[in-house]
Image (tube, helix red, strand yellow):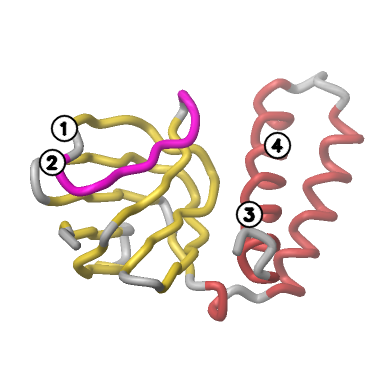
């Protein structure tokens, strides 16, 4: 079974660097499955999990936006942040979700910038909660 190098890079560190069989990301146009030999491209990512398959093992990471660059034999995900499920503080994510929902109810779209920030905060919190609880497995 052929593989390619997957690197997930955040502003803080090289989060992940392994040979993998496939990776699934959610771009702005929808979900993308990437296999060895995929045509090269670059696209922005949504706040969503990244699924990595190596042999019979499937790993899920919480990725908070960024870009994916597919090259001939390498895929690079430049992410704002990335977390393993066991690194996620579920209580903190639940609290962030509640704060974001309260801000969304209070804003009522009067302040478009604040409303969008609250929507993004809610997306990030929901992504962390789902990845942490294994809902995407």
Q: Are marks 2 and 1 in contact (CB under 8 Å)?
A: yes
Q: Which residue is mark 4?
A: 119
Left or right: 53 with respect to 90? left
Q: Which residues are magenta?
A: 29-37
At 49% from the left edge and 50% from the top edge, which residue is drawn? 64
Q: Which residue is mark 3?
A: 127
Viewer-nearest of discs 1 and 3: 1
Measured from the top left, where is residue 73 in percent x and y? 9, 49
Above or below residue 34? Residue 42 is: above
Mark 3–mark 2 Cα distance, whole angstroms, equals 27 Å
Where disc 3 sits, the SS reads helix
Measured from the top left, where is residue 27 in percent x and y? 43, 33
Q: Which residue is mark 2?
A: 71
Lower sequence index among marks 2 and 1:
1
* Residue count near mark 2 (Cα–Cα under 10 Å), binned few <14, some 14–19, many ≥20: some
Where disc 1 sits, the SS reads loop
* Residue count near mark 4 (Cα–Cα under 10 Å), binned few <14, some 14–19, many ≥20: some
Lower sequence index among marks 2 and 4:
2
Front position in the image: 118 or 88: 88
Q: Quadrant of residue 110?
A: top right
Mark 4–mark 3 Cα distance, whole angstroms, equals 12 Å
Residue 36: in magenta span: yes
Q: Are marks 1 and 3 in contact (CB under 8 Å)?
A: no
Q: Quadrant of residue 111?
A: top right
Lower sequence index among marks 4 and 3:
4
Mark 1–mark 4 Cα distance, whole angstroms, equals 31 Å
Left or right: 121 with respect to 23? right
Counting labels gives 4
Lower sequence index among marks 1 and 4:
1
Which quarter of the figure is the N terminus placed in? bottom left
């Amino acid at each position: 079974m052929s593989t390619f190098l997957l690197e997930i890079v955040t502003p803080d560190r090289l989060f992940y660097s392994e040979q993998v069989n496939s990776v699934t990301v959610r771009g702005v146009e929808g979900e993308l499955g990437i296999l060895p030999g995929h045509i090269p491209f670059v696209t922005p990512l949504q706040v969503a999990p990244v699924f990595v398959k190596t042999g019979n093992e499937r790993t899920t990471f919480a990725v908070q936006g960024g870009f994916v660059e597919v090259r001939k034999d390498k895929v690079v995900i430049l992410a704002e942040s990335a977390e393993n499920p066991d690194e996620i503080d579920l209580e903190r994510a639940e609290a962030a979700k509640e704060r974001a929902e309260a801000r969304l109810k209070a804003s009522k779209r009067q302040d478009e910038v604040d409303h969008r920030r609250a929507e993004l905060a809610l997306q990030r919190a929901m992504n962390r909660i789902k990845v942490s609880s294994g809902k995407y497995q």
